[in-house]
Structures are given as structure tokens and as C-alpha cells.
Image (cartoon, rainbow, N blue to C red):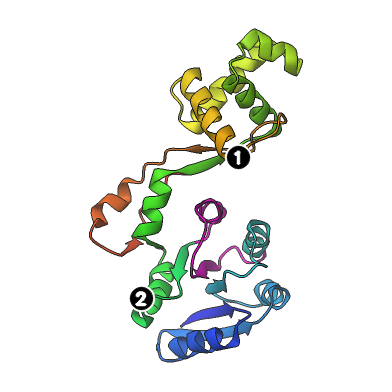
């Protein structure tokens, strides 16, 4: 029987999920936690297969990473009404296995729990489409400075003087950034830098991240479906 821990600071929502779990012979409620501290304690000492986490203000990317570290074998599902694309990408990169919208039907909730436990991913097509259009890659402080200078038209020699590194090192950074961002050349990388500077109004310290195109071929097969429940063999190409 699949052991499920639920976290929510809204008792009526947690009760609804409890009843759904109780009605499914394949699921069993292991714990119902109303705060992150209780959830951390349960994951550290409990034996849960699934964790359904209400996306409260306490659930940050740092908190998600800590929870994953406490119980690496426990598959985590984020339970939310809405979720920012950036945060969804961070969560998936950390290892979150599903993003479940609270307004979906009870049957979709049940399917999500079973799908994730069986090793699949659970995402809505609308979310996949938004991630397909845009994702972010996170930059180190040095990378951010370099892309910012590139966006302002500086050449390798000028960048090397400003940063106090050799031109060879600049070329190594650029090569890594091309692979990391998917940019074909310095011109495309500079364009992306300009777009992000315009969006974020970043200081001279440099960009923190880059929005770059993401191709998710796996979502194209479900163009008419609201839910994309991915089989275990399919993974997001992060």
C-alpha cells in the first residue's frame, strides 16, 4: 500500500485529500502535517512513498531541496492553484515528480498519485506549453557579468581586461555558456542577454539567469489533452 504524507496549512483542503486517500484501497495516509517543521520530522523518520505538498509561502526551492535530501526515495508532488514558470522549472530540476492543480477533479487527483508512485511525471499541458516557450538557466556571478558585457557589445579583449582574466579564459566561459544556454554563437547569446536585461533591469553586477527556448517534444503527442501524464521512460531534457 502506498504511504502518503500530506502537507497543507489549510485544514479543509487537507481533509478533502485525506478522504480521497481513504477511499482508495491502494493508498494510505501516513501523516497530515500543518507546518513544514512537522513535515521535515516525518520525512526524516517516517517511511512515506509520496508527499503531496500544498504550495504555501513556506515551500521555497531551498525548502524543497531540503525535503528531498531528508527522504530521497519519497516522490514529491506540488499541490497548487497556480505556479510561476521559473519556480516550476526549479522544482522539476530538484526532482519534484508532479505539479497537481487543486481545481482538478478527484479522479485526476487519484490518477496523479498513482502515476507518480509508478515512476511517471504529472504535469498539465498548459504548464508544459509555458515551459516549452521559455525556461531559465541559472548563471554564476562570473557568467552573469560576462553575458552582461557581451550584451553591451564588449569584445573578448575588452571583457578580459574588465574582469582581469585572459582572453583564453573568456573563450572557455563563452564555450560553456553556448552549451548551457543553447545559443549558437556570441551574437545569439548577446541577444538573449539584451532581452533579459530589458526584462529584469539588471544591475551592472550581471544577470542572474537567462530565459532560453526549451523544446519538449514529449508534450506534442498530447496536443488535445488537458493532462500530460508522462510514462517513467520519458524525462524532461534539463
Figure check: 206 above or below 4: above
Quadrant for residue 143, please give it.
top right
- Stretch in magenta: 70-96
Query: How crowded is the residue under tag 2: few (<14 C-alpha within 10 Å), some, or many (20+)?
Result: some
Q: Position of residue 10 (x, y in %)?
A: 60, 83
- Which mark's residue is nearer the viewer, 1 or 2? 1
Q: Nearer the viewer, residue 135 or 31?
A: 135
Figure check: 125 above or below 81: above
Q: Position of residue 129 (x, y in %)?
A: 36, 52
Q: Residue at x 49, y 88 (%)?
A: 16
| Pointer 1 residue | 200
Q: Nearer the viewer, residue 158 or 99?
A: 158
Figure check: 64 above or below 165: below
Quadrant for residue 203, please give it.
top right
Label number found at residue 108: 2
Q: Position of residue 145 (x, y in %)?
A: 67, 27
Q: Residue at x 63, y 57 (%)?
A: 61
In three-dimensional space, the C-alpha distance between marks 1 and 2, rounded to whole angstroms, equals 37 Å
Q: How many marks?
A: 2
Amino acid at each position: 500500500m502506498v504511504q502518503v504524507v500530506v502537507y497543507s496549512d489549510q485544514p479543509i483542503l487537507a481533509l478533502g485529500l485525506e478522504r480521497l486517500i481513504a477511499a482508495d484501497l491502494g493508498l494510505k495516509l501516513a501523516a497530515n502535517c500543518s507546518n513544514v517543521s512537522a513535515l521535515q520530522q516525518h520525512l526524516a523518520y517516517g517511511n512515506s512513498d509520496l508527499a503531496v505538498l500544498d504550495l504555501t509561502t513556506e515551500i521555497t526551492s531551498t525548502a524543497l531541496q531540503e525535503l528531498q535530501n531528508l527522504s530521497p526515495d519519497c516522490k514529491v508532488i506540488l499541490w497548487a492553484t497556480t505556479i510561476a514558470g521559473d519556480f516550476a522549472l526549479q522544482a522539476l530540476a530538484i526532482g519534484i515528480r508532479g505539479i497537481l492543480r487543486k481545481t482538478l477533479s478527484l479522479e485526476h487527483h487519484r490518477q496523479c498519485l498513482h502515476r507518480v508512485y509508478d515512476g511517471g511525471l504529472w504535469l498539465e499541458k498548459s504548464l508544459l506549453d509555458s515551459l516549452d516557450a521559455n525556461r531559465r538557466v541559472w548563471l554564476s556571478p562570473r557568467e552573469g557579468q560576462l553575458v552582461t558585457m557581451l550584451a553591451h557589445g564588449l569584445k573578448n579583449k575588452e571583457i578580459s581586461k574588465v574582469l582581469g582574466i585572459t582572453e583564453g579564459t573568456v573563450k572557455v566561459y563563452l564555450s560553456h555558456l553556448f552549451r548551457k544556454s543553447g545559443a549558437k554563437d556570441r551574437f545569439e547569446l548577446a541577444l538573449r542577454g539584451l532581452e533579459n536585461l530589458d526584462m529584469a533591469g539588471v544591475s551592472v553586477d550581471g544577470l542572474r539567469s537567462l530565459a532560453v527556448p526549451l523544446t519538449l517534444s514529449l508534450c506534442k503527442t498530447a496536443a488535445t489533452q488537458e493532462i500530460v501524464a508522462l510514462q517513467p521512460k520519458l524525462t524532461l531534457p534539463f
